[in-house]
Image: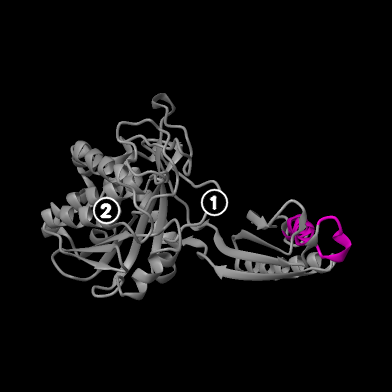
Amino acid sequence: MTGLRFLDGLLEEAIGLHGDLVRLRRSIHRRPEKGFEEFETAALVEKTLAALGIPSERVAGTAVVGLLEGKRRDPAVGLRADMDALELEEKTGAPYASLVPGLMHACGHDAHTAMLLGAAMLLSQRKSELEGSVVFLFQPAEETTGGARPMIEEGVLENPRVEAVFGLHVGIGLPCGRIAVSAGTVHAASDMFDITVSGKGCHGAYPHEGIDALAAAGQVVCALQTVVSRGIDPLEPAVVSIGTIRGGSARNVVAESVRMEGILRTLSPEARRLARERIEKVASRAAEALGARAEVRFQEGYPCLENDPSMAVLVRETGCILLGEENVLEVPRPSMGVEDFSFFARERKAAFFTLGAGNPAKGIVHPAHSSRFDLDEDSLPIGAAMLAGVALNFLQGR
């Protein structure tokens, strides 16, 4: 690691950008946008890249892809940040709180975008030294249907051909100034499913003349709890959740139809296949026992996120140089949360790491997807330096 002189001074230079990064992050935070509606954010990204002399283009609706060419066009490394917000009412009381009712950056994507712009600032100053190109991937819709796949389908990993991709996510459970990275599986796969339970409506005074879809749905919900507890190896992580139930029309009418929405999360292809099969069978048979019918429809979500071992080592090496070995940790176990960076990782060698952004002394303790979520903005230059650092390490260290 002592030979990586091209990383010298990188963190200090990033810290010098602290004010600029805070302004960028807060500007994005005040104007949150839903997936594939990130028009203002995309425009800000384009304007910032243009000021750095980095050409960019729009793809997949609101995605922005910037290209910084060094001494030569190939090889290329990709850096990704997500841009979308959540449908949530902010309750932080911060002076930079969301100005858009019902929308909030409650998962740190505003910070991710600012950090990647910071990395662009750092790398643009080293353009003449780069042994290749850096592709900046500003992605929409991570929280919903996923913007990575349509970006890939539109060729963002080609021309120049991106050989490796890196990304990060802020973590409030990890103190500011630290990172965590591991090889192998780091995030779960997901599958959304809808279950429609159909019965026969009738007057509530004469329930024997109908088939109660609500009663059958209750049995389905209870029975689905056995999919994991009795159908999957207890050493194999899996989660089945029912998030919504809607049905019935009046208090004195036996419900004719009920719809449920749920999600399956798994960490292996075999558990994923088996759980899907059992969800369909259990739902169908539980409803049938009460004379009703259950129809299950799946929508495939994100695949498991797998970190390439050599790229995880590269992130660790970069972190040890920039932050000190004591501040680079292993991810203790995979997250059952999902992350559509996994589509990039499925196409190229990749590594995704957690950037510490928590600070109890500043009241930064609320988790992601909370209406009180915030982050320690001292993490912004650290994230920028780490993203720039891994790109430099990949290109210069070849």
Q: Name the mark nearer the viewer: 2 or 1.
A: 2
In the image, which disc is placed on residue 335?
A: 1
Label 2 vs 1, first from the N-terminus: 2
Marks 2/1: CA–CA distance? 28 Å
Q: Would residue 244 be found to the left or right of residue 104 on screen? A: right
Q: Residues within 10 Å of mark 2 (few under 14, many from 20)?
A: many
Q: Is residue 356 visible?
A: yes
Q: The magenta stretch spans which residues?
A: 204-227
Q: Residue at x 25, y 43 (%)?
A: 27
- Which picture quadrant has residue 140? bottom left
Q: Is residue 23 above or below residue 205?
A: above
Residue 113 in magenta? no
The residue sitting at the right extreme is 208
Q: Would residue 176 be found to the left or right of residue 304 on screen? A: left
Instruction: Name the residue type under label 2.
Output: Thr
In the image, which disc is placed on residue 41?
A: 2
